[in-house]
Amino acid sequence: MIPPDLLFNLFLAVSVVESGVNPDAIGDQGRAIGIVQIHKILVDDVNRIGHYNLLPEDRNKVGYSWLMFRVYMEHYGRGLDRQEDLARLWNGGPKGLNKPATIKYGKTVAEILENTYVMTAARERVANELLKEIQP
């Protein structure tokens, strides 16, 4: 199992790269949605892996995005302990480590993880977004 603090910090860094920590972000010609730019196929995969009933529209909710990220990474990232490798997995799918195109992405995420200022700002933004989701 990937340590929860390592995984959450990775989620924060990926959110900086993917959306600028914006849960309403839409990318990849409308196919990637939310804070960590989730495709519908990943929602389907997480539902299969974790026996969930998540919906594609759940991708723009930070709490659900975190759940999907965690389930996906714990399933496909078993045995990986380097955050850079885990980032490449997120970027390139289950075989992301075999794709040279993911190397730069992994390095970018690793650089963000080392930037205390950016990580603190991302943590605060995610916390505020989570509070918005649970407030009536």
Image: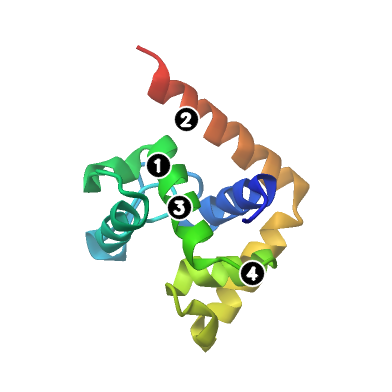
Q: How far is the residue under mark 3 from the one under mark 2?
A: 20 Å
Q: Which residue matches tag 2?
A: 129
Q: Position of residue 87 (x, y in %)?
A: 57, 66
Which residue type does callout 2 highlight? Glu
Q: Quadrant of the N terminus?
A: bottom right
Q: Which residue matches tag 4?
A: 80
The residue shown at (30%, 45%) is 52
Pointer 4 local density, CA inside 10 Å: few below 14, some 14–19, many at least 20: some
Pointer 1 local density, CA inside 10 Å: few below 14, some 14–19, many at least 20: many
| Drawn side of residue 127 relative to residue 120, left or right | left
Q: How far is the residue under mark 1 from the one under mark 3?
A: 19 Å
- Is residue 19 among what the camera can see? no
Q: Which mark is residue 5?
A: none
First reached walking from the N terminus: tag 2 or tag 4: 4
Q: Nearer the viewer, mark 3 or mark 2?
A: 3
| Drawn side of residue 96 relative to residue 119, left or right | left
Pointer 3 local density, CA inside 10 Å: few below 14, some 14–19, many at least 20: some
Q: Which residue matches tag 1?
A: 23
Q: Position of residue 3 (x, y in %)?
A: 67, 51
Q: How far is the residue under mark 2 from the one under mark 4?
A: 29 Å
Q: Quadrant of residue 122?
A: top right
Which residue type does callout 3 highlight? Val
Q: Quadrant of the C terminus?
A: top left
Q: Which residue matches tag 3?
A: 71
Q: How far is the residue under mark 3 from the one under mark 4?
A: 14 Å
Q: Nearer the viewer, residue 44 or 18?
A: 44
Image colouring: rainbow
Query: In what element is the residue under mark 2?
Result: helix
Are the residues tagged 2 and 1 within 8 Å (C-beta)?
yes
The residue shown at (47%, 28%) is 130
Query: In what element is the residue under mark 4?
Result: loop
Pointer 2 local density, CA inside 10 Å: few below 14, some 14–19, many at least 20: some
